[in-house]
Amino acid sequence: MSTPFDRAAACPSCGAPITFRFAGAMAQVCKHCKFVVARTDRDLRAVGRVADLVEIPTPLQVGVTGRWGNEPFVVDGRVQLDRAGAPGAPWQEIFIAFPSSGRWTWVAFAQGRWYATNEAPLPLNGLPQWASLQPGGRVHLEGHGMFTVVEVGRRRVISAEGEMPYVAPPGAVTGFVDIAGPRGEFGTIDYGDGRGIPPKLYLGRQIDPAELRLDSGAPVDQPAAQVTAVACPNCGGNLPLAAPGTTERIVCRYCGTASDLTKGALVALGQVPRPPVEPYVPLGAEGQLRGMRVLCIGFVIRGCTVEGERYRWREYLLYGGPSVGYLWLMEEDGAWQLVTPLSPGEVQPMGGTASYKGQTYSFKQRVNAEVEYVVGEFYWKVEIGEAVQATEYQGSDGKISVEQAPTEVSVSFCSPLRGKELAAAFSLSPPPRAAPGGGGGSGGGSFLLLIVIVIVVLILLVAFSDCGGGGGSGGILFVPSGGSPSFGGGK
């Protein structure tokens, strides 16, 4: 859409010249005063000043050119956002323009996955109320299909640069809902602020970064994590930092101080109890696991209470760089599983079953899983006592784990992992069959103890029967219901 000033005019804030290169761009950040300048039918308007950009590594810097398939593109702008009310590590969305066709798309990277979305028409029957949507629920958008609600929250623009088709005024808080479809579809419903910012719908899909080729020859998807380091603000200990763009909290392995990562520096929050056992896979260990180069960056002990007994298990957070993202190892009573995050839209819970890739998984158990101990680097603000509702579905090839938190849902696939394979991957001695520590409630140990008790009782009953000389002996054979519950480690 052209304007009377032919896409060029003076910044209404500082007077510096502004030129809109892309016809679809309706907003631009002035390079001189950092005001967001909105383009209207008649003039330019300054709608708010952005903060300095947060250093978030990306190969898609503003001005970079390349080809997406056979079509040339240019990175024309980017916007950085955070969650209003609970600020953490911001994320960014990249605005890519296609000069030859005039079309555009947003590209974002999150936890090892790349997504591309475009503005889509609002549903014919309107949007559901923001307050009515719950993580894990289903929502039908007329004309677009059925989606699973992944996250419900509020966000705000904190910084931006370059051109964009639209951007909310800096600092304005808008409600949003992330959604996912069964075939890799992804989208965001931006509900606006209920006043002057209108709602918008963005729909797209997960993409393979190999679809994009930069003219510089550099890869879009870096192959591995580049580890840097930060100093613990309490003890000064050197803490490896594998994912500076997504890490939100680090718990010092030396003194137990929990800190938030803010603009590359750690801000101390306080100390937390140290885990009672050392992790089998040491923090900082590098390995080749099933063809993936991964680093062990976090260790968590979680637990749940079932019929008055406490059960605990151990989880290890792995990071494989942008090409792999985050994975989890879960260990319980010497049995290991590799936990791979899934898009919630790929799994369809239905009554007592869940379907995934054409296979059916049967409901196994549901408990409240709580964080008891934590150390290392994490992509969310992990806290002692943090709880989720964990539901498991069992299949012939593994388990589906669904974890429900107040504002989001996460889904993972848990596949068995032999201890010997894990040891070889990290060049470690074979793990013990049953890991000690982590607290009481080892289900396998309880099960064996009950078996021993039953055998002893039976022997005593037979002995008393033989010595009693009269009457038939009677006894109750107690059959335990099973061992400890087991859970996946998806977050």
Image: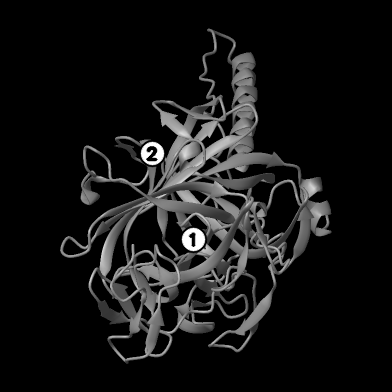
* Quadrant assignment, res 221: bottom right
Give the amino acid at mark 1.
Glu
Q: What x and y, as percent, mark residue 458?
A: 61, 22
The numbered mark, 1 or 2, whose residue comes first in the sequence reads: 2
Residue 173: percent from left, percent from top: 26, 68
Where is mark 1, residue-wise? 372
Is residue 90 visible to us here? no
Query: Which quadrant would residue 28 be assigned to in this image?
Result: bottom left
Of 189 and 62, the residue lying toward us? 62
Q: Residue at x 61, y 41 (%)?
A: 414
Would residue 124 be found to the left or right of residue 99 on screen?
left
Secondary structure state at the residue bearing disc 1: strand
Left-right relation of 184 to 15: right
> Residue 197: percent from the left, percent from the top?
22, 63
The residue that mark 2 highlights is 147
> Which of 111 and 125 lies nearest the eye of the viewer?
125
Tag 2 secondary structure: strand
